[in-house]
Amino acid sequence: MSGNGAAAGASYGDLLVTSLLVLGAVCIAAFVAVRLFGRLLSTGRARGTHLMDVVARVPLEPRRSLYVVEVAGKTLLVGTSEMGLSVLSELDASAVRSRVEARPTFGDLVRQAWLKRRGGGAPAPDADSAGERPSSES
């Protein structure tokens, strides 16, 4: 009877190793498939066509928002609601881009907060220029 127990223990170990190997192979195959087919099925931006871009979004209510979108060279203000989409206005593209570029980056905000916390006094000159950017957009 001890012979059967040893054989059964070895078969469970073999089954465990085989299962782990098969699981690893399936995970690797899935990763490769996602990498290869994901590029083929991705949006137009990844393929270089870049027809539409959402520049900004402002939520008004849970089901209503305003979007600034660039489509085929035009910059549009679009409203969304339960009833669908509505083009509200065409905007000046250069004014929108300058307004978006004037916003401080996340890195600028972190640097400014770090210097404010660390120094408590006057911030460094580059943090001053980052701090002046938000006031210029008002």
Image: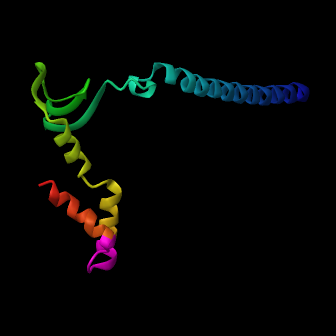
The quarter of the picture where residue 56 lies is top left
Q: Is residue 76 above or below residue 130?
A: above
Q: Quadrant of the N terminus?
A: top right
For this orientation, the residue located farthest to the left is 88
Of all residues, the one furthest to the bottom in this rendering is 121
Residue placed most toward the observer, 62 or 22 = 62
Please identify the quarter of the rendering in which residue 73 is found: top left
**Point 58% across, 22% down: residue:** 33
Q: Position of residue 97 (x, y in %)?
A: 23, 42
Q: Position of residue 6 (x, y in %)?
A: 87, 30
Q: Is residue 93 magenta?
A: no
User: Is 13 situated left or right of 64 in this image?
Assistant: right
Image-quadrant location for residue 32: top right
Find the magenta span and give its range: 115-125
User: Where residue 76 sits in the image (x, y, percent)?
Assistant: 16, 29
- The location of residue 136, given as percent across then percent down, is 16, 58
